[in-house]
Amino acid sequence: MNQTARYLQSVSDQKGIEIAALVNYLLIDAIKSNASDIHIEPWESTLAVRIRLNGVLNELIHLPLDLMDKISGRLKVMANLISYQNDLPQEGHAPANAELGGVELRISVFPTVRGEKIVIRIFDPSNRSFDLGTLGFEEETLQILIKLLARPSGLILFTGPTGSGKTTTIYAALYHLVQRSGPTISISTVEDPVEFNLPMISQAQINPHKEFTYPVALRSLMRQDPQVIMVGEIRDAETAAIAVQAGLTGHLVISTIHSGSTAGVFARLINMEIEPFLLASSISGVVGLRLVRKNCAFCAEPYQPEPSMLRTVPREDLENASFRKGVGCKECSFTGFSGRYAITEMLVVNEILRDAIMQKLPTRSLQEVAIQQGMQTLWQTGLRRALTGQTPLEEILRVVAVDQF
């Protein structure tokens, strides 16, 4: 039983509930479970509280709907929001405090027809490692990324859905550059928002309300003599054009971009009216990222996936497969999983790929060229994790779409 449930049992009736204490217990339960987010949402008859563990939502507790406004009010006070406003979205930040173990909270409140939905993102500075070597990359991928980071110029792009580890990987890449070069390198970032303060790096947060946008920030930054520029996200044609130009003019540029696939990044940028010859010349590599859950070391045991899933695995791989799956225990909060691995798709732009990009080949053809040049797909790197018992086969199929095989 979690602390929230124990607290509610200790109170004789609903009137005796102290909202500040209840909210603290909810936060402590989530933090102790290593959750990344808390969702507090009014459902038909209850106030559902769910926590995101290793990327997947799990129910924590259901509370009486009557507590909605009080809990919302308490969290708004913590984040310095307008407590009486409940018909507009609000976002705020609750600084770290010792009572909650030093974690920081980003609180988002969103009005729905049943009441306000609250999502709390938990940032634990003590639990964040920005060491490339501890991100769980395969050794070959890691070495290629380190080689790309050693180049004095060019554009390195990371792509993947929200929560796939892009920000953590980029911060680790910047940290690697600081460790390698120390005070001899000038690194600047433009982000929305700045999630962690990094040592020896100039970090700026955009503010659209004051017209401090990505393009405005980047143009000004080019006069700040940076060697490495990190752009939080390439969202529009103007930002893309400046990032590409910076990569061509002697800067190492690191950024993220949303795309359905690694090879699809080029089509996305061409749609932003960036000339293919500029992309071919400026982009050094594209890294596709996904996160899959690790089997719990305490309760994982051999199992046989369903026949329909086994049909996705090449027959020669099945002969030596060692499929394992966590059955759930106290150590993993009965989820069967503990922590996550990165699975990657590392596309390095060489001469053959440059020619293919300049010919405006469709995404599928670019993908085939990259595979011929030795690129391991997300499916291949994920499948290796499953075949060696690090994660169930179902987990790879959950994260990697069938059309990415």
Image (cartoon, grey):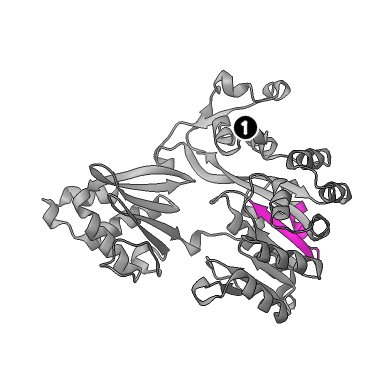
**Residue 337, magenta (yes or no):** no
Kindly identify the residue that appears in the image at 49 percent across and 46 percent down. 55
In the picture provided, is 121 more to the left or to the right than 6? right
Quadrant in which the N terminus is drawn: top left
Up/down of 252 relative to 67, above or below: below
In the picture provided, is 337 more to the left or to the right than 164? left
- The residue at which mark 1 appears reads as 402
Characterize the local packing of mark 1: few (<14), some (14-19) or many (20 or more) Cα atoms within 10 angstroms. few
Kindly identify the residue that appears in the image at 34 percent across and 62 percent down. 88
Kindly identify the residue that appears in the image at 75 percent across and 77 percent down. 184
Quadrant in which the C terminus is drawn: top right
Q: Position of residue 299 (x, y in %)?
A: 47, 34
Which region shows up in magenta? 144-159
In the picture provided, is 266 more to the left or to the right than 400? right
The image quarter in which residue 118 lies: bottom left
Give whichever of 387, 44 is nearer the camera: 44
